Image (cartoon, grey):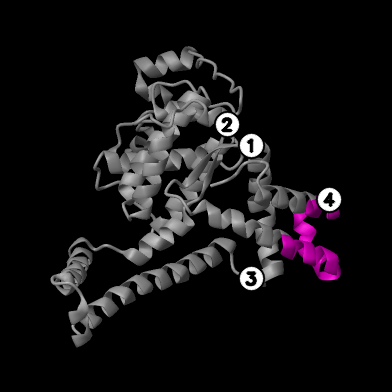
Amino acid sequence: MNIAKDSPEVINFMMLFQKLRGCIDDRPEELEKLAKDNESIRQLCIDLECATFPILINERRRRRLFASPVDPKFIKAWRDYEEQYATPLARIVFSVEKPVFDVFRKIADDDANEQANAIEGVLDFAGEQVTQDWCNVFPQGFTESIVEGVSAWNRFTEETGFDLRGIFRRRNLVPFVLMPRHVSQKYGEAEKISLLTHLQQAHDAFVFGMPFAALALMRSILETTLKKHYHADGNDLKARINNCLELPDGAPKQDLHCLRCMANDVLHLNNERVQLPADSEKELLRLFLVLRTLIEKVPQCAKTSPPPAVGRSAVLSMRHPSAAGGTTNNSSGRLRSRANQD
């Protein structure tokens, strides 16, 4: 994807977005009212939405659902647009009343259904036509290969549960990551194991309907990002989250612990504690957004977390767990043990 700061799509978006922000004094909460009362502002909203389409379309044209390196100014502007302006703009331009995510998922699913049906339709058509008399004009063995190809596809989808519609939908929904220059420069394209390869495979696992694998990779991405880019100290992931000093808005410790605990439940094969939400697809997308925020807002010079103080209460707790509120009650300790896993 071309996210160079001098690309026509980026220049057009940045110009229109800056113009809109200037017209409304950067008050997105008042945008709908202002657009209703002022036709020029409404037209500017339409122009801005049209300017985002080429960028959104280009994001999905390659296998990797991230781009690097990306100018930090564009990252900030694009995320400001998504976080503050996308919802009111959708209401103005498309008369959308539902939550934006629900609308996007419905659009993504409708589009996925069309694509999956088109592929199935082509295969069905080929299977039907190959039995017609006019197919005798093809070289010997050609019609047999078509029949075998259609049969192989049908066996594959039935035996593996391959969900073509779901794959198209999830790929359309995966949050695209704009990798800052000071993050991407730490990794080479040829590295077999890196933050970039883990991110790509986490996306692939989610897209192909393997949420447990996605969670495991997302946990690894979280730990690597905190350790290598936020310089968070600690002997385990729980400590690194708690000790991190510069977590950005949109990646609170509560959400990072949520990802950690869900991934731990999966990795440790504890059936009693694996509790994925009813809408696991939506929850994983939410956690992908948290990871995206964490990566895109890595500070250029992260502060190192100070070593934890060891006072009298800490010494007591190490010698006598009950002095720090510890308990041996199994019925009430289950959730605590889940939260205390690294």
Q: Residue 251: where, in percent of width, then height?
A: 55, 40
Q: Which mark is residue 22?
A: 4
The mark closer to the camera, 4 or 2, is 2
Q: Does 35 sit left or right of 103 as displayed?
A: right
Please name the residue shown 35% across and 18% down the image.
320
State how far apart marks 4 and 2 are (Cα): 28 Å
The residue at which mark 2 appears reads as: 181
Assign a secondary structure to mark 4: helix
Question: As rendered, which of 87 and 72 lies closer to the eye?
Answer: 72
**Among numbered discs 2 and 1, the one appearing first in the sequence:** 1
Q: Nearer the viewer, mark 3 or mark 1?
A: 1
> Quadrant where the C terminus lies?
top left
Residue at the spot 68% in from the left edge and 58% down from the top edge: 51
**Which picture quadrant has residue 269?**
top left
Closer to the chain start, of discs 4 and 2, is 4
Gap between marks 2 and 1 measured at Cα: 7 Å
Instruction: Indicate which disc residue 97 carries.
Output: 3
Residue type pointed to by label 1: Asp
